[in-house]
Each structure stands twice: as structure tokens, then as C-alpha cells.
Amino acid sequence: MNLKDLQLAELENFIKELGQPKFRAKQVFQWLYKDGGVTEWDQMTNVPKALREKLAEEADLGILKMLQVQKSKLDGTRKYLFELQDGNAIESVFMKYKYGNSICVSSQAGCRMGCKFCASGMDGLVRDLTPGEIIGQILAAEKDTGERINHVVVMGTGEPFDNYDNLAGFLRLLHDPNGLNLSLRNITVSTCGLVPGIQKFAEDFPQVNLAISLHAPNDEIRCRTMPVSKAYPMPELLSACREYAEKTGRRVTFEYTLIKGVNDQKEHAEELVQRLRGMLCHVNLIPLNTVKESGFDTTAKKDAQAFQALLESKGIPATIRRELGDEIDGACGQLRLTNRRK
Ligand code: SF4
């Protein structure tokens, strides 16, 4: 059992089963999250030795093994490849911004959504990550950098709403005042467009930010690159987004990867404006990181700027994603893909 999969209340029950008083659970829980978390049971200095030994017999600290780290000399970005207990590998990216440190975490090993431009989904879904494995990525990065992370985006490998219960467990752990105590407002969850997940998320976590991987102005183009669009067409998806924005008062971010000749022309920008008009939203334009296997190319910088200018001129706030870790940054999923094919 990975101790980091447990909420504090569950840990209290577990500690009770071991015949120990409830307050010990809080002490153990705090050690799991302090300064990237303890790596040895003996480091829990205020926990009696007998309990530490019992815990070591029954449970695991859930520490992720770092297989690889690529560090940017330019901006402090670090791209990690971690190994899970069962040998599967996942990626996370640590980034430095003016407003603090941010991490992009994976929610699944692999992904079954099959987006054509994505290296993460190329081998399909291997398995869901547990709450402890998702939070373990943050702790491992804090340990490695020696720095506190204050923004989290669930935008790495996997579709978070395809693993909803574990995502929810992770968000609760992340927000726990005895653990990392991260404000829900500093967390963003990104989905490729699973409508029932969006609706549930608006009910369960109205303070967490929502991002949608949109990547197209209409279903005809979206279906070519994102099969999810067949199950949840854009009118249904955008209406769920409007409901989310109205219910939560939070701005929806639309991620739009610019792919040369596919979705980056003037008529595409105009169509996108029609779709999003009147919605509390923001468009984040992402120049595609070329994935050799995908056969797609990135849009030229000046074309990306023209796309942005058109959206802005029609009242849709838009930015072009700052390219962090440029010299190390293969497309998301690339490290894992390379590792599997070695
Ligand atoms: S873009 Fe996201 S949802 Fe689509 S295949 Fe890749 S990881 Fe999955």
C-alpha cells in the first residue's frame, strides 16, 4: 500500500487498526509532504520506533524513482521521467515563472484518447495513476529542486477525467492543510473534452481552473486529430464549458495547438471567434512541438502572431504560450516514448 494514496481520515483509520492513537496519523501525514517528503521511515523523528517498523511492514512511502532529468540552462525548466513501482514510466515538467514555480503532472501512464498529434497517447493507455502517484511527482520535483511548487497543472500524459476518482483524491490531498496545502485556485485541470467529467468537475471543484484541449475551430477538423470529438461534438462541449463558466465564475482556458495548414489559417481563427463569442474564456495558442511520428508541422511564428491578433481584435483574449525549456523540450510524452522504445 502506498501511504500517499490515503487521505488523512483514511490514514487515521489505518493507524487505529495498528492500535495507535489518532494523532499519530497527523504526524505521519505531515512527514509525507514536508520538504518533498521523507525518504526513510526513520526520518519521522517524532513517531515511535515501533509504529515506524509496523508501517514499514504494511506500507510503502510511494517514492518515485527518477530515471532521467533534462535541465534547461536558460530558464530552469526541468523535464522528468519517473519510474513507478511496477516499472511503468511517466513524465512531469517543472517550470519557473515570475509568479512562482509550476509543475505539469501526468494522470495516467499512457492515454486512450488517441489524439493524433500527441506522443503520450501513441501506445494507448497502460493504466490509471493513483492519487499518491500523481502527488508523488510534485514531491519528487520539490525534492530535486529544493524549491516549493505553488502552481499545478494536470496536463501531462493522460486524460484526467478518464481517471476521475483518483484525480479527485489527488486534488483533495494537494489541498489538505496538513500536506502541501495548495490553494485550489492555483490548480488547473486540462481535459480533451469529456463532457460528463466537465459537468461533475464544476459541481465538485468549482474553485479549480479548467482548461480544454480544443485545437480546432470545428468538428470536421477536430475529428481528424481528436477522436473524442466523435463522442462529444463541439456544440455539446462548448455548452458544457459555458455552463462551467456560469456556475463557477471562472474563466475557461482553451488550449489550441497550432498545426501548420491544418487549423492555423485566418478562416479558422474567424470560426473560433464565432464559437467562443460571449464566453468567459481565454485562448492559449501553442506552437506544435513536432513529433516525428505524427506527420504534423508547427506553424511559423508570424502566422501564430496573426492568429492571436485576429482573436484579440474580436474580443477573445489570447496568448501564445511562452516556450519554456526550449532546448530540452521535446513534445510532451516524448521522453517516455523514447524510453519505451529503447
Ligand atoms: S493530448 Fe492528452 S488526451 Fe490527447 S492523447 Fe495526448 S495525453 Fe491523451
Image (tube, helix red, strand yellow):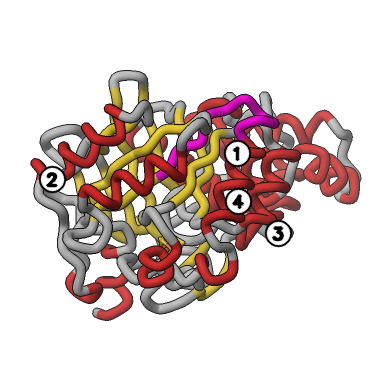
Residue at the spot of label 3:
57
Relative side of 28 to 269, left or right: right
Residue at the spot of label 2:
303
Q: Find ligand 1 in the image and state its quadrant.
A: bottom left
Q: Are marks 4 and 1 in contact (CB under 8 Å)?
A: no
- Distance in Å between CA atoms under marks 3 and 1: 50 Å
- Check residue 132 in the rendering and tell me which mark sits there, or answer none: 4
Among the 4 quarters of the image, the one containing residue 40: top right
- Distance in Å between CA atoms under marks 3 and 2: 59 Å
Q: Secondary structure at mark 3?
A: helix
- Distance in Å between CA atoms under marks 4 and 2: 42 Å
Name the residue rendered at 65%, 30% in the picture: 246
Name the residue rendered at 71%, 30% in the picture: 27
Q: Please tell me whether residue 171 belongs to the stretch shown in magenta.
A: no
Residue nearest the viewer, comparing 147 with 173: 173
Question: Hey, what amino acid is under mark 1?
Answer: Arg
Residue at the spot of label 1:
242
Q: Secondary structure at mark 2?
A: helix
- Distance in Å between CA atoms under marks 4 and 1: 32 Å
Highlighted range, magenta? 245-254
